[in-house]
Amino acid sequence: MGIRFILLVNKQGQTRLAQYYEYLTLDRRSALEGEIVRKCLARNEQQCSFVEHRNYKVVYRRYASLFFLVGVDNDENELAILEFIHLLVESMDRHFGNVCELDIMFHLEKVHFMLEEMVMNGCIVETNKSNILTPLQFMDKS
């Protein structure tokens, strides 16, 4: 499959967005999020952005006060996932103008919509920023 989940978490460890591409019960999701967030936030900037946890490889990157965590299969290319995270941040920057945590909190449906344009069933299907953002322009007009 590829991508199993995407999490956006602030520096305090509060989840701001969670998107799963496989079925997990709510209890398993909460436990998984807590374990992964604690593990990633405890790492310093000199350590690499890849962590193995259970049967996932977690690729993460920090932008300002937000951590973008993507859980993938063990055979997935880590650098491609880092590029995907960067593309997501650039798309949000273009739409919101220097995206911050509050933009995500107050426009959660738009961020989910961007993710739905980019990822389908755990596979990256769109990488063109214009194609990702064009449908959002129609949402803003209505």
Image (spheres, helix red, strand yellow):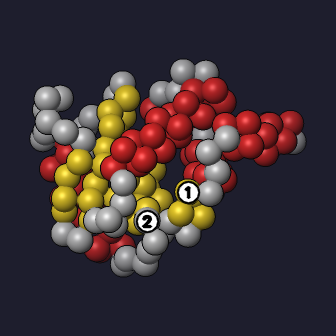
Q: Amino acid at mark 2?
A: Gly
**What is the secondary structure assignment of the residue under circle 2?**
loop
| Residue that label 2 marks | 2
| Pick the front one: 9 or 114 | 114
User: Can you see residue 16?
Assistant: no
Quadrant of the snapshot with the C terminus = top right
In the rendered structure, the answer to whether residue 83 lies left or right of residue 43 reads right
Badge 2 density bin: few <14, some 14–19, many ≥20, Cα 10 Å: some
Q: How many marks?
A: 2
Residue 112: image tag? none
- Find out whether the residues at labels 1 and 2 contact each other: C-beta distance under 8 Å: yes
| Pick the front one: 78 or 39 | 78
Q: Amino acid at mark 1?
A: Ile
Query: Residue at the spot x=67%, y=37% of the render?
Result: 129
Query: Residue at the spot x=33%, y=50% of the render?
Result: 78
Residue 124: image tag? 1
Q: Is residue 16 above or below residue 4?
A: above
Which quarter of the picture shows residue 25? Answer: bottom left
In the rendered structure, the answer to whether residue 141 lies left or right of residue 123 reads right
Badge 1 density bin: few <14, some 14–19, many ≥20, Cα 10 Å: some
Q: Is residue 101 above or below residue 98?
A: below
Q: Earlier in the sequence, mark 1 or mark 2?
A: 2
In the rendered structure, the answer to whether residue 24 lies left or right of residue 122 reads left
